[in-house]
């Protein structure tokens, strides 16, 4: 279980179900956020290498999200990472993973998450989602409850407003969403769209 604030952890658990290829996430499938939102997705990730010196990774996803309030969003995501290794020389570069969010062909928002690596090799992933003028910050959570150390892959994502955690999406094992009761409908929509973009995208620097 991912680390989350006590206030968020005390909220009702909203299940996120995914029906993908062979019962898993796979390259395409459908999803539901309780009875509040539903949609479908298609995603892909490719890796290539030239002579073991230059490596390149690309990831992309397209998803549609329908809300029970009548909204129909489409998100289109992409990202790229490259690395150069020759003897003692090693360099890497990663573009932020980004998604354009549209409704009826009109741009209504944006999603972005980027990786920042430290000198010790650890990495942090953070970004934001905007939807219809509402902006929510987000960050990957790699620390489990009861653990003193962070893992390599995200266990979920934390969503914050004014530096206060207002929602958390668990992506390790069963997918769930918990939100504080005081958030607005617009903020909830942005959090759900950000959750889908975070949980179902194959980012270039990730194998899941």
Image: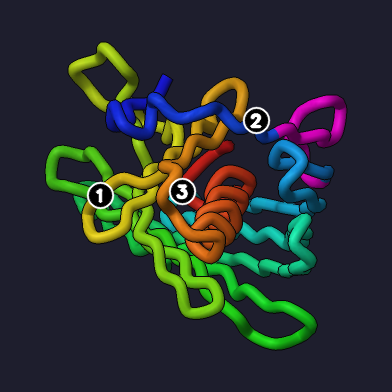
Return the residue at label 3: 205
Spatial CA distance of label 2 from label 3 is 27 Å
Contact, CB < 8 Å: mark 2 with mark 3? no
101 left or right of 139 in image: right
The residue under the point 73% across, 69% down is 74
Q: Which of marks 2 and 3 is nearer the N terminus?
A: 2
Query: Is 46 placed above or below 96 here?
Result: above
Residue 11: image x %, image y %? Answer: 45, 30
118 left or right of 4 in image = left
- Residue 24: percent from the left, percent from the top? 76, 28
Q: Upstream in the sequence, badge 2 or badge 1? A: 2
Task: Say whether marks 2 and 1 touch (CB < 8 Å).
Answer: no
Q: What segment is highlighted magenta in the picture? A: 17-28
Question: Which residue sits at x=58%, y=21%?
Answer: 173
Location of residue 100 with respect to 123 vertically, above or below: below
Vertical placement of residue 204 versus 18, above or below: below
Instruction: Give the residue at mark 1.
Output: 164
Residue 4: give its label.
none
């Amino acid at each position: 279980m991912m680390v989350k604030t006590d206030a968020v952890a005390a909220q009702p658990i909203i299940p996120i179900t995914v029906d993908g290829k062979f019962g898993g996430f796979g390259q395409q499938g459908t999803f539901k956020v309780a009875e509040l939102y539903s949609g479908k997705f298609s995603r892909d990730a490719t890796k290539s290498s030239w002579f073991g010196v230059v490596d390149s990774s690309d990831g992309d996803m397209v998803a549609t999200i329908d809300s029970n309030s009548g909204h129909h969003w489409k998100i289109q995501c992409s990202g790229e990472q490259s690395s150069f290794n020759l003897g003692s020389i090693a360099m890497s570069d990663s573009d932020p993973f980004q998604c354009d969010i549209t409704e009826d062909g009109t741009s209504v928002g944006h999603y972005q998450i980027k990786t920042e690596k430290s000198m010790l090799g650890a990495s942090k992933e953070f970004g934001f989602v905007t939807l219809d003028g509402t902006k929510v910050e987000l960050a990957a959570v790699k620390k489990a409850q009861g653990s003193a150390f962070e893992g390599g892959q995200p266990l979920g994502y934390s969503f914050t407003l004014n530096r206060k955690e207002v929602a958390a999406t668990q992506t390790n094992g069963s997918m769930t969403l918990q939100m504080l009761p005081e958030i607005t409908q617009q903020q909830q929509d942005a959090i759900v769209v950000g959750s889908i973009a975070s949980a179902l995208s194959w980012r270039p620097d990730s194998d899941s």
